[in-house]
Amino acid sequence: MNRLLFVFLLTAFINLINTLTRSSRLSGVRTKHLATAISLFSVVYLAASFANTLQAPLLASTVESAIEEAYNQSLLIYPGNAIESPLYQATLVELSRKLRFVILGATLGTVVGMFAIPSFVTSFSNAIKSFGQTGSVFKVIYLFFISMFKPGSGILRFRMSSRDTLKELLTRKMSIPKGFLYWNLASYSLWTANVLSGLYAGALYPEFRSTAVLMASIVGNAAIIVNVMMVDPILAKVTDDVARGIRDEIELKQIVLFLAISNLLGTLLSQAVFEPVAWVLQLLTGWIV
C-alpha cells in the first residue's frame, strides 16, 4: 500500500475514535456504570494512540526524503538561497498537497464517526454489561469479535438515529451556552493540524527542520489545554446531571452530536490554518536558533 494512503487511513481511524470518545459517556449513563465506561473506552483509545505513534514517523520519513533531495539539488544551483529556487518551491507545493490529503483523512474519519455514534453507543453499552457479567476485558474483546461474524448477536449492534430524533436534536434549544462549541472548534482544528504544520515548517526551514518539527508540540499541547479547560468540564457537568436525573438524556445526546459536528468543522478549518501555523512555527524556530 502507498505510504501516504496508509497514513491517510491511520488519520481517519484516529479521528473516528476521537469522534466516538464523547459518546462513550452516553453508554455510561444508560448502564449506570460511568466509571466502567470511561475505563473500558481507554482500551479502545489505546488502538488510536498506537496509530497516532505510527502517523508522525511515517509522515516524517516522507517529508525528509522529499526535501532532502530537492534542497541538495537547489544548493547546487542557488547556493545562496536554495529555498527560493523553483525546484524547492515546487517541492513545497507538492508537499503541501500531500499533507492536506492527510487532513482530508481526518475529515473522513470524523464523518464516519458521526454516523457510527448510534451503533457505538448501543454496542458499547452491551460491552459494559458483558464486562459486568464476565469481569474480564479479554472476554469482552472475544465476544465483540465473535459478534462481528454473527450480525445481530452478542455485543455488536448496528443502528441509525431516526429522522425525528435527528430533527429534535438539531432544532431544540440548547440549555447551556454554546461558547464551548467554538472552543472545541478552535482546539480541534489546531490539534488536527499541529503535527502536519510542524513537518511543513521543517520544510520551510530545512536547516533546522528538527527544531521546527518539535515546536509543533506547543500547538498540540495548547489545543489540548483549551479542550481540557473549556470543553470537557461542560460535558462532564451535563453527564453528571443526566446520571443524577437532573437533566434529560436528550440534552447529553445533543451535546455529543454538536461536539461531533464541531470536530468535523474543525478538520475543515485545519485546512485553512495548516500553512499559517507552519509559518508561525517557522518564525518561532528562527527566533529560538
Image (cartoon, rainbow, N blue to C red):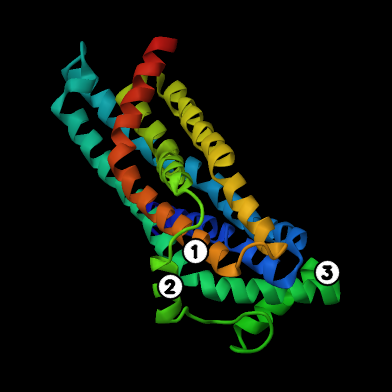
Question: Looking at the rendered structure, which numbered label has been put on residue 21?
Answer: none
Quadrant in which the C terminus appears:
top left
Instruction: Identify residue type, mark 1.
Output: Gln
Crowding at label 3, few (<14), some or many (≥20) Cα neighbours within 10 Å? few
Disc 1, SS: helix
Quadrant of res 74: top left
The residue at 60%/68% (across/down) is 249
Element carrying mark 3: loop
- Residue 20 is situated, as x and y percent measured from the top left of the image, at 55, 61
Which residue position holds label 3?
A: 136
Q: Nearer the viewer, residue 99 or 43?
A: 43
User: Residue 89, image x and y in percent?
Assistant: 19, 30
Q: Amino acid at mark 3?
A: Ser
As measured in the structure, the alpha-carbon distance from the residue carrying label 2 to the one carrying label 1 is 9 Å
If you read the primary sequence from the N terminus, does the residue marked by circle 2 or circle 1 appear first? 2
Badge number at residue 168: 2
What percent of the width, then of the height, locates residue 266? 38, 48
